Amino acid sequence: MTSDPLVAVVHQRLPAPPHVVYDEWTDASRLAEWMCPRPARCLSVTADPWIGGAVRFEIEDSGLVFAVSGNYVMLDKPHRVAFTWSCSTWPDPTAQSLVTVTIEPDGPGYSLMTIEHTLLPSGLADQHARGWAQIGEQLAGRLSPGSGDPGGSRPADRQAGDQRLAASGGQPGRARGRTASRPTRPSR
């Protein structure tokens, strides 16, 4: 008997340096542009990039509205972002998984992004791996020359589809973005 994988891992080469990719993961208005696997769309996005700060996506997919929420647990600019992840459609919507995004330089003007989604509920790893792969492609498209991205022009990546999917199970919680609330740090 084999155990059900509880991890989804996706690698994506991106036409942007690490600091630009990092900023995409911590800015609500940027996340709103690429975070949800299409055709789903984000109705709202919250990103409060400080340890303990909220990350939340309200998503509409084929008429179903649901939420993905969590909190930032690691912010190591420009190398790593990690946040907890819970989805209102999971069998136990209070279950928490962990998304860790690692960003490494991969030649001048490029990054290799690895998304590792761990502690997924049983049976959801493949679905999340497919979703994260699509999200990686959407981010690559956003960062490609001529996309109007805020990072400026970069060399064209003729192999933007150069993603490697290594799923040890998983389905990405389906988050997408349209309307964003700007991140703010609470006063202390």
Image (cartoon, grey):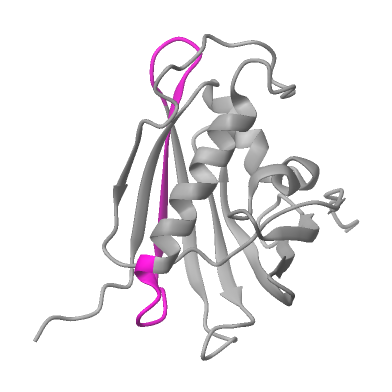
- Please, is residue 91 above or below residue 14 in the view? below
- Please, is residue 92 above or below residue 88 in the view? below
User: In this image, 167 relative to 97: left or right?
Assistant: left
* Nearest the eye: 42 or 53: 42
Seen as rendered, the residue at the extreme bottom is 92
User: In this image, 109 relative to 169: left or right?
Assistant: right
At 54% across and 20% down in the image, what residue appears?
17
> Which picture quadrant has residue 7?
bottom left
State the quadrant of the C terminus. bottom right
At 53% across and 90% down in the image, what residue appears?
92
> Which picture quadrant has residue 51?
bottom right
Q: Position of residue 98 (x, y in %)?
A: 48, 65
Seen as rendered, the residue at the extreme right is 187
At 59% across and 22% down in the image, what residue appears?
144
Give yes or no for residue 122 being in the magenta stretch: yes
> Which picture quadrant has residue 94?
bottom right
* Nearest the eye: 105 or 91: 91
Q: Position of residue 75 (x, y in %)?
A: 58, 46
Which stretch is magenta?
Answer: 105-126
State the quadrant of the N terminus. bottom left
* Nearest the eye: 117 or 80: 117
Q: Position of residue 11 (x, y in %)?
A: 37, 41
Asked if residue 81 shows in the view, the reply is yes
Q: Position of residue 137 (x, y in %)?
A: 50, 39
